[in-house]
Image (cartoon, helix red, strand yellow):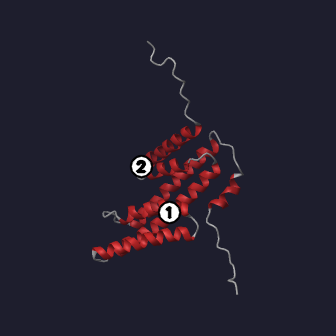
């Protein structure tokens, strides 16, 4: 008796699936060849940034870098405050205030897509008790994120390229933070 008889043929993996896996493996190769730690952050960035269009990859990547930078800055601020011997309740209050401010800043600059990664980076830095150099850690996480984003972008752009909705150069300004308008208050 043939168990598989009558079953539908399974679909092949899609190109985005293959490009995602390839981007992650390229990150592994880059880090292995450099003897560098932090490959998981680069591979995760590549995973998240591989989108169905190059434009979306750029936008997701820009939000991820911005969020990583903001979370790193807040994490560094918190670790510097934590070196002062604070009562545990005050320490938690400072943590609470910084999370509120971090989310507020992302909302203020209209980058709500960066909130989650900002908070993740902040928590990792703020709650890592064995971290000797939060600034170095933050810089390395931004670098790891950039390597993953660039890898995903290059794979998405040059291998099995999806149909572009608009030229890539035109998509870059849309992914960057907007400049606040200089409007005069009503009189």
Viewport quadrant of the C terminus: bottom right
Q: Give the percent coordinates (x, y) of residue 53.
A: 63, 47
Residue 184 lies left or right of residue 124; in this view the side is right
User: In this figure, which residue is indicated by the disc labeled 1?
Assistant: 115
Q: Give the percent coordinates (x, y) of residue 134.
A: 39, 66
Q: Name the residue located 31 percent from the left edge and 64 percent from the top edge.
A: 129
User: In this figure, which residue is indicated by the disc labeled 2?
Assistant: 35
Crowd band around label 2 with a 10 angstrom C-alpha radius: few (<14), some (14–19), many (20+): few
Give the structural element (helix, strand or loop) at label 1.
Answer: helix
Residue 172 lies left or right of residue 80; in this view the side is right
Q: Give the percent coordinates (x, y) of residue 23.
A: 53, 44
User: Relative to the observer, which residue lies in front, 146 or 60?
Assistant: 60
Viewport quadrant of the N terminus: top left
Q: Give the percent coordinates (x, y) of residue 88.
A: 28, 73
Image height check: is 24 above or below 126? above
Crowd band around label 1 with a 10 angstrom C-alpha radius: few (<14), some (14–19), many (20+): many
- Dividing the picture into quadrants, the one containing residue 140 is bottom left
Mark whose residue sits in front, 2 or 1: 1
Question: In the rendered structure, which disc, 2 or 1, sits on the residue that comes first in sequence?
Answer: 2
User: Relative to the observer, which residue lies in front, 88 or 49?
Assistant: 88
Image height check: is 72 above or below 20? below
- What is the distance, in whole Å, between disc 2 and disc 1 at their CAs? 31 Å
Give the structural element (helix, strand or loop) at label 2.
Answer: loop
């Amino acid at each position: 008796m043939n168990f598989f008889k009558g079953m539908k043929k399974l679909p092949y993996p899609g190109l985005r699936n293959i490009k995602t896996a390839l981007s992650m493996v390229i990150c592994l190769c880059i880090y292995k060849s450099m003897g560098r730690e932090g490959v998981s952050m680069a591979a995760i960035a590549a995973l998240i940034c591989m989108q169905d269009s190059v434009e979306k990859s750029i936008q997701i990547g820009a939000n991820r870098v911005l969020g990583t930078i903001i979370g790193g800055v807040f994490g560094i601020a918190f670790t510097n405050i934590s070196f002062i011997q604070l009562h545990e309740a005050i320490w938690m209050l400072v943590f609470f205030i910084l999370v509120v401010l971090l989310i507020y800043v992302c909302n203020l600059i209209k980058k709500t897509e960066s909130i989650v990664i900002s908070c993740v980076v902040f928590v990792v830095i703020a709650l890592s008790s064995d971290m000797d150099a939060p600034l170095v850690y933050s810089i390395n996480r931004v670098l790891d994120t950039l390597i993953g984003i660039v890898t995903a972008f290059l794979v998405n752009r040059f291998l099995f390229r999806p149909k572009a909705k608009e030229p890539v150069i035109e998509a870059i300004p849309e992914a960057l933070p907007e400049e606040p308008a200089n409007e005069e208050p009503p009189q």
